[in-house]
Image: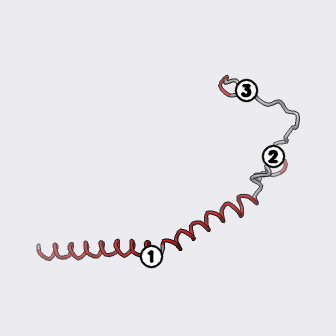
Amino acid sequence: MQKIINVLAVASFALSSAIAASGVYVYVNRDSIIDGVKQKVMGGFGGAALGGGALTGDVGLPISTQPDAAPNAPVPGGGLGVPQF
């Protein structure tokens, strides 16, 4: 029984040490971690998202399936009977 308790104590110490070491690593390298995340997020906004035609109406559909925008088409009314001012 004593051997099982000793194994559990050693395992608990190892787990606690690993968690503490991870916390120290994140604390010491927090600036570089934050910069890396910022670069990945901003890279997602700049590259394909803006260059993919999201602002131009080109959503990647073939030309024949893209809806034609009629310049004089009537604007549909408000949903659920709510008047628009």
Image quadrant in which the N terminus is located? bottom left
Q: Residue at x 17, y 76 (%)?
A: 6
Local secondary structure at mark 3: loop
Local secondary structure at mark 1: helix
Identify which amino acid the numbered label 3 is placed on. Answer: Phe
Q: Relative to 36, is 77 above or below?
A: above
User: Which of the two labelled residues, at mark 3 and mark 2, occupies the earlier sequence position?
Assistant: 2
- Please state if 70 lies on the left or on the right of 61 as rendered: right
Q: Residue at x 76, y 60 (%)?
A: 51
Q: CA distance from mark 1 to mark 2?
A: 51 Å
Please provide percent x and percent y for residue 22: 39, 73
| Nearer to us in this view, 14 or 7 | 14
Disc on res. 66 = 2
Image marks 1 and 2: residues in contact by CB distance under 8 Å: no
- Please state if 60 lies on the left or on the right of 38 as rendered: right
- Please state if 80 lies on the left or on the right of 9 as rendered: right
- Mark 1, residues whose alpha carbon is within 10 Å: few (<14), some, or many (≥20)? few
Local secondary structure at mark 2: loop
Please provide percent x and percent y for residue 25: 42, 75
Identify which amino acid the numbered label 2 is placed on. Answer: Gln
User: Which of the two labelled residues, at mark 3 and mark 1, occupies the earlier sequence position?
Assistant: 1
Q: Residue at x 85, y 33 (%)?
A: 73
Q: Nearer the viewer, mark 1 or mark 2?
A: 1
The residue that label 3 is drawn on is 85
The residue that label 1 is drawn on is 28
- Please state if 25 lies on the left or on the right of 35 as rendered: left
Image quadrant in which the C terminus is located? top right
Please provide percent x and percent y for residue 42: 64, 63
